[in-house]
């Protein structure tokens, strides 16, 4: 998989490298940067900024009172005091967050501003490995390895055109290696529905600062559906709205034949969102393992020291199943991921 930016929608996503311009690529840099090479390096200031940004922008600041989060907060300050290089600090920070209380927290070396990166992500191409369509007799196998990329969206649309032209009798959608991303979720499901469906809502600080309960399906449906379909627009609007309602509209050609969606424990973020939405559609069956349970929307922020901090600015609640973060999406047919394709073919 060339590019699965995990978590912006994940939205905000979930979680592989694209190239050195993306946040993931920074984690692969091996050059040591020391105080001598950058006189202004101040890792304690970076650690303080991380904690301040988290409290300022986290979707529910009350979650930052947990013992687990407070442990990481203090450990980050201690790490900054002892780390001698940016790489050492990055590695230590990532190790701390392996046992963090919520997903979608990342720290990377910045190669441009967060605004510039957002513009880049809205126009990114994920590459040839993002989407593939193959056939076994009259069964179409659509493999989607990321929800990022303008070319991913175009490739999914093109695949459905071919599926219609060839008259597929069965469709299998493989999301087992999909770590999330952004808005390729829209064409993936919109060609499978004949009427609009409400998927769920992103819930941010304006809701959690007022309510001490989770939103209901009625709360979500009371909001006008969001139509921005841009990472930059989403980042702006999700932080100001208590609930951002996500609705999918049908897009021709519509495939209404038997459809199977393959999942694994690493199916994450936006891939979980679309899996959950598909599960509510009658002709779609989910086959494989429960998904990762990492469904928050993150935003990238500039912080001192030449870093980008990604943190979750919105939680997500499915209209049909509720919260996905920490829970995951359960398959209709629960089998090991490596046997899911065979099961779907023979079902």
Image (cartoon, rainbow, N blue to C red):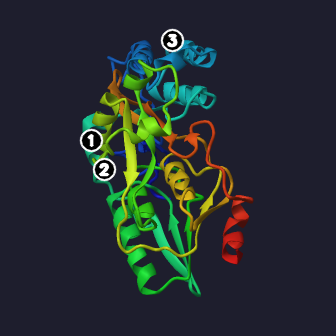
Q: Is residue 132 above or below residue 185?
A: below
Q: Secondary structure at mark 3?
A: helix
Q: Which quadrant of the figure contains the C terminus?
A: bottom right
Residue 229 is marked as 2
Inter-mark Cα distance, 1 to 3:
37 Å
Instruction: Evaluate if marks 1 and 2 touch, with contact meaning CB atoms under 8 Å apart.
Output: yes
Nearest the viewer among 272 and 96 is: 272
- Identity of the residue drawn at 48% across and 71% down: 132
Residue 134 relative to residue 58: left or right: right
Query: Which percent across, then down, holds residue 174?
Result: 57, 65
Q: Is residue 144 left or right of residue 45?
A: right
First along the sequence among labels 2 and 3: 3
Establish if 141 lies above or below 138. above
Q: Local crowd at mark 3 within 10 Å, few (<14), some, or many (≥20)?
A: some
Q: Of label 1 and label 3, which has the lower sequence position?
A: 3
Q: Position of residue 83 (x, y in %)?
A: 52, 19
Toward which corner of the image does residue 288 lie, by quadrant? bottom right
- Give the distance between the C-alpha atoms of the residues marked 1 and 2, in whole angstroms: 7 Å
Residue bearing mark 1: 233
The numbered disc on residue 81 is 3
Residue 86 visible in rendering: yes
């Amino acid at each position: 998989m060339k590019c699965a930016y995990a978590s912006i929608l994940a939205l905000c996503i979930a979680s592989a490298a694209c190239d050195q311009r993306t946040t993931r690529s920074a984690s692969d840099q091996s050059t040591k940067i020391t105080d001598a090479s950058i006189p202004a390096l101040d890792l304690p200031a970076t650690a303080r900024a991380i904690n301040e940004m988290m409290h300022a922008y986290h979707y529910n600041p009350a979650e930052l009172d947990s013992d687990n989060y407070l442990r990481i907060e203090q450990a980050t300050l201690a790490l900054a005091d002892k780390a001698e290089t940016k790489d050492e600090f990055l590695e230590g920070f990532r190790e701390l967050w392996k046992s963090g209380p919520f997903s979608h927290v990342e720290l990377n070396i910045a190669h441009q501003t967060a605004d510039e990166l957002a513009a880049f992500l809205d126009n990114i191409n994920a590459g040839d490995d993002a989407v593939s369509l193959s056939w076994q007799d009259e069964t179409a196998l659509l493999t989607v390895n990321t929800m990022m990329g303008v070319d991913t969206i175009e490739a999914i649309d093109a695949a459905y055109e071919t599926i219609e032209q060839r008259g597929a009798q069965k469709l299998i959608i493989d999301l087992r290696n999909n770590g999330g991303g952004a808005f390729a979720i829209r064409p993936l499901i919109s060609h499978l529905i004949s009427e609009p469906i409400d998927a769920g809502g992103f819930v941010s600080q304006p809701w959690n600062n007022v309510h001490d309960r989770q939103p209901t399906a009625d709360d979500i449906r009371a909001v006008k559906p969001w139509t921005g379909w841009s990472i930059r627009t989403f980042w702006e609007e999700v932080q100001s709205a208590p609930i951002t309602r996500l609705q999918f509209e049908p897009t021709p050609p519509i495939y209404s034949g038997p459809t199977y969606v393959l999942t694994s424990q690493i199916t994450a973020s936006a891939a979980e969102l679309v899996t959950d939405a598909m599960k509510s559609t009658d002709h779609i069956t989910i086959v494989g393992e429960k998904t990762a349970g990492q469904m928050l929307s993150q935003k990238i922020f500039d912080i001192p020291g030449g870093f980008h901090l990604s943190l979750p600015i919105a939680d997500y609640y499915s209209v049909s199943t509720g919260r996905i973060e920490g829970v995951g999406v359960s398959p209709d047919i629960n089998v090991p991921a490596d046997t899911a394709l065979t099961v779907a073919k023979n079902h």
